[in-house]
Structure formats: C-alpha cells, structure tokens
Amino acid sequence: MEPVLLGIDQGTTSTRAIAFDQRLKPLAVASRPLAIRHPRPGWVEQDAEEILESVVATVAEVSDACGGPDAIVAAGLANQGETVVAWDAESGRALAPAIVWQCKRSEPVVERIRAAGLERDICSRTGLPLDPYFSAGKLNWLLAENEAVRAARDTGRLRFGTVDAWLTWHLAGTARTDLSTASRTQLFNLRSLQWDPWLLDVFEIPDWTLPEIVPSAGDLGILGHSRWNAELPLRAMVCDQQAALAGHACFDPGALKATYGTGVFVLANAGNQVPDTDGSILATVAWSLPDGSVAYALDGGVFSAGTLVNWLRDGLGIVASAEEMEAQARSVPDDGGVLTLPALAGLGAPWWRAEVRGGPRSHCRSHTWCDVGASRSLRIGRNRTPGL
C-alpha cells in the first residue's frame, strides 16, 4: 500500500481533509461547512463541538477512501488562528461558544488596556497592535463575562486555547499549539518564544490554562478517534496563513503570498530575525522546525473579503450567487469613481481600527469619506491607500 499524507485544514467557514500520495497528488478530499453565528452586531462565534465533529468526520471519510487510516504515514493540521475555545478539563466539553477571530466583543477590554498606556510594550513583545482580532482580549472577556468559565477557573478545571489546542486535547490527549499559532494570541513573546508572564498578568490569564507550545513540524504526537480505527502520526501544526506561506514555497526571505478567503491576508517571509515593526504591519512567527530554527513573517490582513461577497448576496440581494459577481463587474466600463471599504468587521492593517464600519458619506473622483463613528471619519485616498 502506497504511503499517504493527510492535510487537515480547519478553517472558519469549513473544515477540509485532503489525502496526498508521495508526489503530492491529491487522492481524496472531504469537507464540511461550518455555521457562523452573529448573536449581536460585531459578535462572531461558532460551535466548538461542531468544529471538532467536522475534523473527525472529514478525516474518517478521507481515510476510508484511501484504504483506511493505516495507510496514512503523516498528518498535518492547519487552524484558523486567533479563534479561541474555553473548555472543562474534566468533561472535555466547551464552556462557551468559540469566539472567532473576526469577533469584536472584546473591544472594551482592548480599550481599557490601551487607556492604561500599555500598547507600546505589548507591541514590542508580541509584534501585534492592540486589537480585538487577537486571542488575549477574547480570553479576558470570557473570564469577565462567562460564569461557567470563571467557575472552571476557580476549581482548576479551565483550559484555554486556540482551535488547534482544542482539537489536540480531544484527539491527542493533551492540548498543544505551535509557535506560529501562539504568536497570534498576544500572549506570546517573539524573542523568548514562550508565554510571556507580563502579558499573562496584563490580560489576567492563568498560565496553567494554556496549551503546551511545540514546534510547527516534527514528532508532535498521535491523533486518534474511535471512528478512525487507527492512529495518525501528527507531524505538522501551523496557523492557516503561515501554512499557506509554506504551501506556496515562500521559504526565502522576501518571498510573499496573498490568500483570498474569508479575508485577504498577505504574508512575507522575514527571515530568522524578529522584524522591527510599529504594529501597522504584524510581526509573527512563520514556522519553527525540530532543530530549534524559527522563521518570522510580516503580515497584513483585510478581515472581510469572502464575507463581503456573502453579504452582497445574502444581505443586500444584489446577486443570487457569488459566481454572478464577475459578470456584473464585466458589464460596466469602469468603477465610476466608487471605492469599496470592506469594513464589515473593522479595518485591519495598517490602521487597526476595530470600530470602523463602511458607510457612504460623500465622495469625489479622488477621495471617499466613510463614517466611522459619531465624531470621526476616515479619508481614503484614491490610488494611495495601502491594503485596499
């Protein structure tokens, strides 16, 4: 039986498992869509148990198509990054919905810490500006606002983590996260490559609630489930955008990729030294290897891309399907001077304005003004606006 490699891509809108042969030719694919809930304006959440089930189901389907799990010699797991889960260490059950990376409910947490004058120090340690996008504020919000989470903390049963930690807790017996994903939490020090005690204190997160940090590649344990009938050697764990950077063979400093999905994310390989950044563009870990070597990346992201298309289809009813949009765009000679500000979930790089929402105020051929609150507006310069 030919050895099989398994890739598990746990994303925001779906989970996909793909089996490859030794020449990286796809042998089988399975996917499951995931529901996204918006219980309040700006809030984005998912069912953590549904995420787990989607991984179990897709892996079972693909492994069966390839002759069973015994054929799989190595598995890799990519995850959706900053999304967080809180669970009970005794029951294994999620204590709250998974708070998705797009969610803005932790804005008050971020603003409180910013008002304390800590943003510069946080950015120097993490490479990340203060923003609800990152995991730390979400975890602080859960402790402050969710009674079940607080009760689990008080009894020592609370476990926190990004989606990879949630999955490895259930499928590998212990919660693990790799350096690339840990670097998206705003609790990780880019220089010490560990959870930072000062950051844990700022965000009031007990260190014992967090997962073990492991390299992005190597012997990372065994994945198993009763529905798989065999164990899978876990050999890679990487945050989704960093996984895409590696998937596009961007192994040399300066190599760059852009990924279009729920959002748009541009990452550039920055070599083996921590990049200097003022927080407008993120500094992050790209990946780490078993020999201890670490590659870093520079990252700029737009939070709403595919979600903007879905909103135009489902919210405004401009098109009946996403596929119709290309025909609509080709039916006119030019854009007529109109710019689209995809701020359904705030503005990402380089502004990091979580409160911004796109709304027409006035426009001319050279500039567009968009309402961003009762007393402020954002001026977007035509052909001079980075990231849009």
Image (cartoon, rainbow, N blue to C red):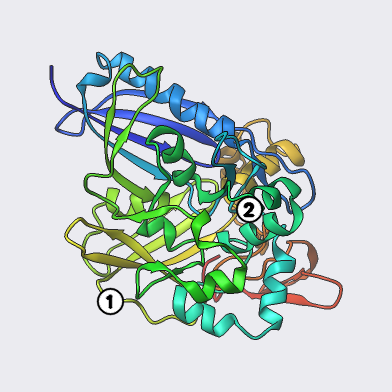
Three-letter amino acid code at the position of disc 2:
Arg
Near-viewer residue (268 or 208):
208
Residue at 52%, 54% in the rendered image = 209
Instruction: Judge from the rendering whether residue 21 lies leftward or rightward of residue 104; answer left or right.
Output: left
Residue 75 visible to the viewer? yes
Near-viewer residue (3 or 298):
3
* Residue holding disc 1: 273
Q: Which mark is residue 153?
A: 2
Give how far across and how far down residue 242 sits, in percent: 36, 55
Three-letter amino acid code at the position of disc 1:
Gln
Instruction: Judge from the rendering whether residue 169 lies leftward or rightward of residue 19; answer left or right.
Output: right
The quarter of the rendered structure image containing the N terminus is top left
Rendered image quadrant of residue 299? bottom left
Residue at 72%, 39% in the rendered image = 318
Residue at 32%, 68% in the rendered image = 296
Compare marks 2 and 1 and give the one earlier in the sequence.
Answer: 2
The crowding category of the residue bearing disc 2, from other C-alpha atoms within 10 Å (few below 14, some 14 to 19, many at least 20), is some
Give how far across and how far down residue 64 sits, in percent: 32, 14
